[in-house]
Image (cartoon, helix red, strand yellow):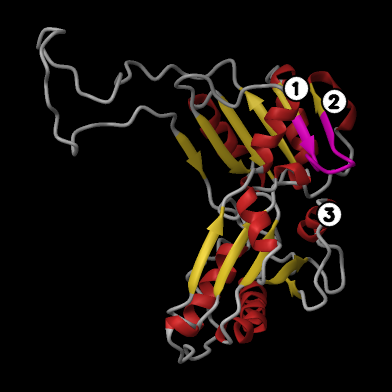
């Protein structure tokens, strides 16, 4: 079941505070693992006066996001806040976790101090931060919330493997694999690149499916990309891993050689006219169409801690 970041069953009255007195909540994207991918903006916030908050999947457990910051040479402040986001499909469990996390950081924000939430990967891409931000905004509507973008795992995986995600006008689809093969089979013909996240539960079935359709040579598995125990394999090497238990931090990139052509595309940023090449034709901005790749993004069933 997908839980909207705007759905919060825990009812806490909005905080009575002026925006001038509030701190700012930052979602600090750290990339998937390599500390070299931390942006200058993220570094500036993390080395400033903001109070850190970091996610864990179980209380007292390891935080991948915090580990990335530590590998960059940043020391965890003594007053850093641990935020527990359990791995669960239960909407009530998740909503209560977001509420508890919001209430853990609100006193700092209401006192006028910024809070920097460490986020693995990119905070706008399947990250728990969006749910935490919604919970904070519900309790303190005037709160300033800013997201600092970062490298996402599939872009890092493509770079590490030296393969393109898209060329020219190719199409990309990004899907959580836990939606199953039926959706994957429906989507695949329309995209040159299919990115599957959260492949762990579907992995043995997925390898068999790729093999049956002669797609293994075009598939790449990236596990814990950017971390010291990174693993990147492709093609027939995936067959040997069919029965392996993968990390939660595993994804698959499939370059589809059989994508269905889409027909004529609109070229450039202006509509075609019958005017001669030397004639200047002004087109209203409302009619102009951007020249860009098309991407399909599905919402995750369970975003998990990031």
Q: Residue 108: where, in percent of width, then height?
A: 63, 83
Answer above or below: position of 81 versus 238.
below
Q: Quadrant of residue 263?
A: top left
210 or 19: nearer the eye?
19
Q: Residue 147: where, in percent of width, then height?
A: 54, 59
- Say whether disc 2 or disc 1 marks the residue closer to the N-terminus: 1
The answer to whether the residue labelled 2 contacts the one labelled 1, judged by CB atoms less than 8 Å apart, is yes
98 horizontally vs 79: left or right: left
Q: Residues within 10 Å of mark 3 (few under 14, many from 20)?
A: few
> What residue is rendered at 19% in x and 23% in y?
271
Q: For residue 231: magenta?
A: yes
- Say whether disc 3 or disc 1 marks the residue closer to the N-terminus: 3
Q: Quadrant of residue 61?
A: bottom right
Question: Would residue 56 be seen by someone viewing this image from the given angle?
Answer: yes
Q: For residue 18: magenta?
A: no
Q: Which residue is mark 2?
A: 239
Q: Which residue is mark 1?
A: 211
Label 3 and label 1: CA atoms lie apart by 43 Å
- Say whether disc 2 or disc 3 marks the residue closer to the N-terminus: 3
Q: Residues within 10 Å of mark 2 (few under 14, many from 20)?
A: some
Q: Residue 272: where, in percent of width, then height?
A: 18, 17
Element type at marker 2?
helix
Label 2 and label 3: CA atoms lie apart by 38 Å
68 horizontally vs 53: left or right: right
Answer above or below: position of 225 versus 277.
below
> What residue is rendered at 60% in x and 83% in y?
106
Q: Which residue is mark 3?
A: 73
Label 2 and label 1: CA atoms lie apart by 8 Å
37 horizontally vs 72: left or right: left
**Stretch of the chain drawn in magenta:** 221-232
């Amino acid at each position: 079941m997908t839980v909207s970041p705007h759905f919060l069953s825990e009812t806490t009255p909005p905080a009575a505070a002026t925006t001038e007195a509030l701190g700012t909540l930052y979602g600090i994207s750290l990339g998937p693992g390599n500390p070299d991918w931390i942006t200058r903006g993220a570094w500036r916030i993390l080395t400033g006066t903001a109070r850190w908050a970091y996610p864990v999947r179980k209380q007292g457990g390891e935080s991948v996001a915090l580990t990335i910051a530590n590998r960059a040479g940043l020391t965890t402040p003594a007053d850093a806040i641990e935020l527990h986001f359990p791995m669960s499909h239960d909407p009530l469990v998740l909503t209560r976790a977001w509420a508890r996390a919001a209430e853990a950081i609100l006193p700092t924000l209401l006192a006028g101090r910024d809070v920097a939430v460490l986020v693995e990967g990119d905070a706008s891409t399947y990250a728990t931060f969006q749910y935490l931000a919604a919970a904070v905004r519900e309790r303190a509507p005037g709160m300033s919330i800013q997201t600092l973008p970062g490298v996402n795992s599939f872009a890092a995986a493509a770079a590490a493997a030296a393969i393109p995600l898209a060329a020219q006008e190719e199409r990309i689809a990004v899907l959580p694999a836990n939606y199953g093969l039926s959706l994957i089979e429906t989507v695949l013909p329309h995209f040159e690149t299919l990115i599957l996240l959260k492949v762990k539960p579907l992995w043995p079935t997925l390898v068999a499916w790729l093999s049956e359709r002669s797609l293994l040579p075009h598939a790449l598995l990236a596990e814990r990309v950017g971390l010291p125990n990174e693993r990147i394999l492709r093609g027939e090497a995936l067959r040997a891993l069919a029965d392996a238990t993968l990390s939660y931090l595993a994804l698959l990139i499939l370059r589809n050689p059989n994508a269905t052509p889409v027909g004529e595309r609109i070229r450039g940023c202006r509509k075609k006219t019958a005017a001669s090449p030397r004639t200047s034709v002004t087109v209203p901005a409302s009619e102009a169409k951007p020249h860009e790749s098309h991407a399909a993004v599905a919402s995750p069933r369970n975003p998990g801690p990031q």
